[in-house]
Image: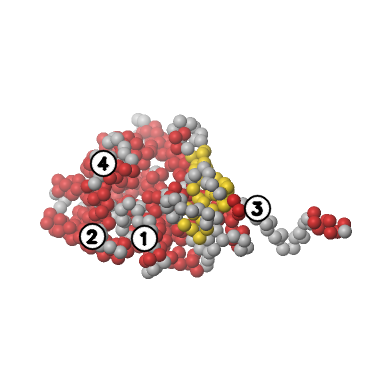
Amino acid sequence: YWCPFTKVSPLYWCPFTKVEESFNMQAMHDILHHGLNLSAYDHHSFPGTVPRTFLGAMITALVASPFSFFFQSVGAPKIMSQFAVRAALGLISVAGVSSFRWQLGKKHGAAASVAYGFVTMIQFHLVFYATRALPNTFALALVNISYGYYLRGDMTRSMCLLAFTGSVFRFEVLILAAPLFFLALYRKQVPSLLRLIGSASAVGAAGVALSVTVDSLMWGRLLWPEAEVFYFNAILNRSHEWGTSPIHWYVTSALPRAMLGTALFIPTSLWFNPRVRDLFVCACVYVSIFSLLPHKELRFVLYVVPVFNMVCAEELVRLWRGRENPKYGKYWFRGATTILAFTLFGTWGFLKVSQQNYPGGAALEELHNLERLNVTRGLLTPHVHIDSSAAQQGVTRFIEEQRRWVYSKKEGEHDMAGYTHLVTDKASVEGFVPFITVTGVDLSSVMTSPRPRMVPKMRVFKRKDLDVAPPPPPPPPGKPQQATEADDDDEEL
């Protein structure tokens, strides 16, 4: 029962989103707020480097729509709808985890299921990504369900799910399917090879047809989004334009950060629990293949973390059952408990640092708070320019005010005189004065100092001719207004 809570809890600590989530967040906003008015959708103005499928955004928006429509009907801020769609995505992620846990419990026992759930809840990255509107998050939910079918021995459904996921959301899932398929053949768990290949091919083709139909309509041209992504990343190999990492980066940096202290359970679990070795080897093969690409991100290999967590869970169960062993049993179990405590502490540290990673959203929210009185009194009609840096660090259409505010994300050099406020990471802008400064963690100081340094990350500038103090608010009802100097002069006269 704690799993849904932990998956959704990052909404409170980190309510904003990053550039990787931009397409799906804007798509969910437009689906909920513009409906069939496709001309108003954000992707026409800002299509991104490669097109993405709308299917994940549509499913999530459908789940969140009752709550979003309620918030709209009562005039609540639009950011409440952002909370709703991210919470809906979190519940979809929970459904995937629960499916895997259920089959794990039936296959390896209830204790393994409980241990797996606990390990998953105390790791930062799985919890953090559960509500992030990334194609990898949609894919991970389906991969978890596929793992459940795989444990049950239903290879046909498992491969069909992976084929659908790879054709619609993330092509690399097909790479993950390959070692799992060959492992099933090796174990002689495929009753009919032709039926499995035929079913998986048919489901994959259905996913392609569905994606082409829906996304061609939404994008206004014939396309299969995931094919274009594959061509851009694998054939053209242009993903390196977003940075490169050494071939060992997943093993030496990304996965240890994802696992934290629980990674220490893997070696002993592989030694004492032979039944988890095969799936672990499949996960390692996938990581090895993907390590060949120069551009690396943790989310690309996030699908192997559930398998690693299953390996950890088996070891925790072994230590739990052996805690009464008179020969060092209780000490090994106490050591495991200490590791779990440190893992939870590390998760808390990651969460606190992540709070500082969305200065664009924080700056725009602070601007709304400071200028709300002037706007309500009709003294100001804000026309806010949001530059690309702010848009990549927390700003979405969900956090824009609905009434009297005008926003622009126009790129390139152009006349800024028509704007009342600028949200930017620049240190100064001619004709504007600093109004708000949002600080964040200097990442270069995180590993070199026990107390990370805070530096300016984002600023809001206000046009000089508008840089006047707002009039004081009226006194509360029943409270006499204080006399001003002018009133005192009148009384003397």
> Which class describes the residues within 10 Å of circle 2: few (<14), some (14-19), or many (20+)?
many
Tell me the CA gap for discs 4 and 2.
Answer: 25 Å
For the point 31% across and 58% down, the residue is 53
Tell me the CA gap for discs 3 and 2.
Answer: 58 Å
> Which class describes the residues within 10 Å of circle 1: few (<14), some (14-19), or many (20+)?
few
Give the residue number, with chain letter if any, for mark 1: 44
- Of labels 1 and 2, earlier in sequence is 1
Above or below residue 35? Residue 187 is above
> Which class describes the residues within 10 Å of circle 3: few (<14), some (14-19), or many (20+)?
few
Task: Give the label, 1 or 2, closer to the camera.
Answer: 1
The secondary element bearing badge 2 is classed as: helix
The secondary element bearing badge 3 is classed as: loop
Task: Give the label, 1 or 4, closer to the camera.
Answer: 1
Give the residue number, with chain letter if any, for mark 2: 208
Tell me the CA gap for discs 4 and 3.
Answer: 55 Å
The secondary element bearing badge 4 is classed as: loop
For the point 72% across and 63% down, the residue is 477
Tell me the CA gap for discs 3 and 1.
Answer: 39 Å
Above or below residue 420? Residue 235 is above
Which label was assigned to residue 469? 3
Give the residue number, with chain letter if any, for mark 4: 293
- Of labels 1 and 4, earlier in sequence is 1
Give whichever of 26, 156 is nearer the camera.
Answer: 26
- Of labels 3 and 2, earlier in sequence is 2
Tell me the CA gap for discs 1 and 4.
Answer: 30 Å
Image quarter of the N terminus: bottom left
Q: Which amino acid does label 4 sit on?
A: Leu
Q: Which amino acid does label 3 sit on?
A: Ala
- Of labels 4 and 2, earlier in sequence is 2
Q: What residue type is labelled 2?
A: Val
